[in-house]
Image (cartoon, helix red, strand yellow):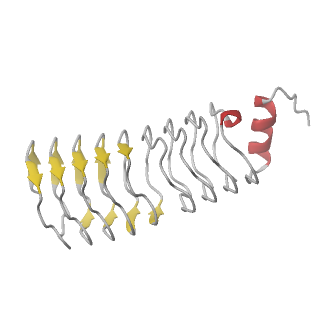
Amino acid sequence: MTTYDGERFAGDDWYAEDLSGRTYRRCTFRDVDLTEATSRGTTFESCEFASCRLNASTHVGSAFVACDFRRTSFFGATLEGCKLDGSVFVECTLRPLTVTGGRWSRVTMRAARLSGLELDGVDLVEADLSEADLTGTSLRRCDLSRASLRATTLHEADLRGARLDGTDLELARLRGTRLDLNGAVHLAERHGAVVEA
C-alpha cells in the first residue's frame, strides 16, 4: 500500500487513474482532473480538494475523512459504501450522483443541491444539511439522528424508515414530504401534540 503524506498536487491529469489501495493524509489537490478515476479501499484523510473534477469517477469502500471539498465536481460519480465522516462540501456539484449506502456522519453540506438523489440507507448522524435542497430526494432508512435541517428544503422527499432522534423537522421546509408512522409521530410531538395509542 502506497502512502502519501502532506504532498501537494496541482493541475495534474489523473484521468481514469486507478487509486485503489492508496492512502493520502493531509494532502492538497488543486485543479486535479480525476474524471473517470476509480478507487477501492482508498483513504483520504484531512485532505483538501479545490476546483477538482471527479466527474464519472467510481469509489467503492473508500474513505474521505475530515476532507475539505471546495468548488469540486462529482457530476455522474458513484460512491458505494464510502465513508465521508466529518468532510465539508462548499459550492460543489453533487448531482447527478449514484450513492449506495455509506457513512456520512458529521458531514457538512450547507446549501448543497442534493435534489432528486437516492441516499437510501446512508448514515447521516449529526450531518449539517442546513439550507440544502433535498427536493424529491429519497432518504429512506437513513439515520438522520441529531442532523441539522435548518431551512432545509424537503419538498416531496421520502423519509420513510428514517431515524430522526434529536432532529428538528420543524425547522425544515416540508411539502408533500413522505413520512412513516414513526416520522409522523415525531413531527407531531415536535409541534406539541400528545400522541396516544
Task: State the residue in front, 178 or 54.
Answer: 54
Q: How many marks?
A: 0
Q: Quadrant of residue 46?
A: top left
Residue 101 position, x and y percent, is 48, 58
Whether residue 69 is situated above or below residue 31 in the rendered picture: above
- Is the C terminus in the top left, top right, bottom left or bottom right quadrant? top right
Task: State the residue in front, 52 or 56.
Answer: 52
Q: Residue at x 25, y 54 (%)?
A: 51
Residue 113 position, x and y percent, is 50, 53
Q: Residue at x 16, y 43 (%)?
A: 25
Q: Residue at x 79, y 43 (%)?
A: 184
Task: State the residue in front, 188 or 32.
Answer: 32
- Is the N terminus in the top left, top right, bottom left or bottom right quadrant? bottom left
Left or right: 194 as drawn, with respect to 120: right
Q: Quadrant of residue 117?
A: bottom right
Whether residue 16 is situated above or below residue 94 in the rendered picture: below
Q: Residue furthest right?
A: 197
Left or right: 119 as drawn, with respect to 92: right
Q: Residue at x 27, y 72 (%)?
A: 36
Residue 175 position, x and y percent, is 75, 50
Left or right: 4 as drawn, with respect to 162: left
Q: Quadrant of residue 33?
A: bottom left
Residue 5 position, x and y percent, is 9, 44
